[in-house]
Amino acid sequence: MSELGKVVSALLFGSGVGCIFFLILCVIVGLPSVKGVVYGSEVTATSVACVEPVKVFKYTKEGKLVEDQDVEKGSARYIVLYNRGQKTIFKVCKVVGRREGYDMLVVKGKKTKLPQTDITDKVIKELSKKEQ
């Protein structure tokens, strides 16, 4: 490992401050969870739903702002709006998923032992009602 790699590794993981910095970074980036699980546990799940957050984003207030104002993808403004939109998306996902009887909800593409039912369209419909 290079000297720079050793320094970065020590800063990030060698102290409590580094670990806190890493967790804050995860929150800023807007990860729903590290493993793509919105809620639930594969150990106890009996029914699994999945959702495509990127597809749902354009139906959020923030997604509409990105489109209306032609915000450049990857810009600081885009990242802030996307993170806000994701918070809304995952709140609505939890409501829809639980109402439909799913005890686990994952981001589409996450591999699970049980078959998944895509509830993206139901989430979009619920979000459209909420945004009116």
Image (spheres, grey):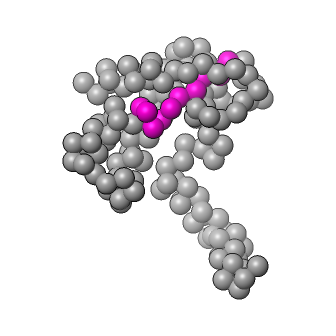
Q: Report the side of 56 relative to 16 (left or right).
A: left
| Any part of residue 9 in sight | yes
Q: Report the side of 38 relative to 53 (left or right).
A: right
Q: Residue furthest top?
A: 100
Q: Report the side of 54 relative to 45 (left or right).
A: left
**Start-end of magenta stretch:** 47-56
Q: Is residue 84 magenta?
A: no
Q: Which residue is found at the position 52% from the left and 15% from the top? A: 99
Query: Which picture quadrant has residue 36?
Result: top right
Quadrant of the rendering where the C terminus is positioned: top left
- Front residue of 103 and 72: 72
Indicate the position of residue 102 as horizontal and vertical percent values. Answer: 61, 18
Q: Is residue 55 magenta?
A: yes
Q: Report the side of 12 relative to 56 (left or right).
A: right
| Any part of residue 15 in sight | no
Looking at the image, residue 21 lies above or below residue 94: below
Indicate the position of residue 67 as horizontal and vertical percent values. Answer: 27, 42
Indicate the position of residue 21 as horizontal and vertical percent values. Answer: 57, 66
Q: Residue furthest bottom?
A: 3
Count the marks: 0
Q: Which residue is found at the position 34% from the left and 48% from the top? A: 81
Quadrant of the rendering where the N terminus is positioned: bottom right
Query: Which picture quadrant has residue 114?
Result: top right
Looking at the image, residue 123 lies above or below residue 101: below
Q: Residue furthest left?
A: 69
Q: Which residue is found at the position 39% from the left and 56% from the top? A: 74
Q: Which residue is found at the position 38% from the left and 19% from the top? A: 125
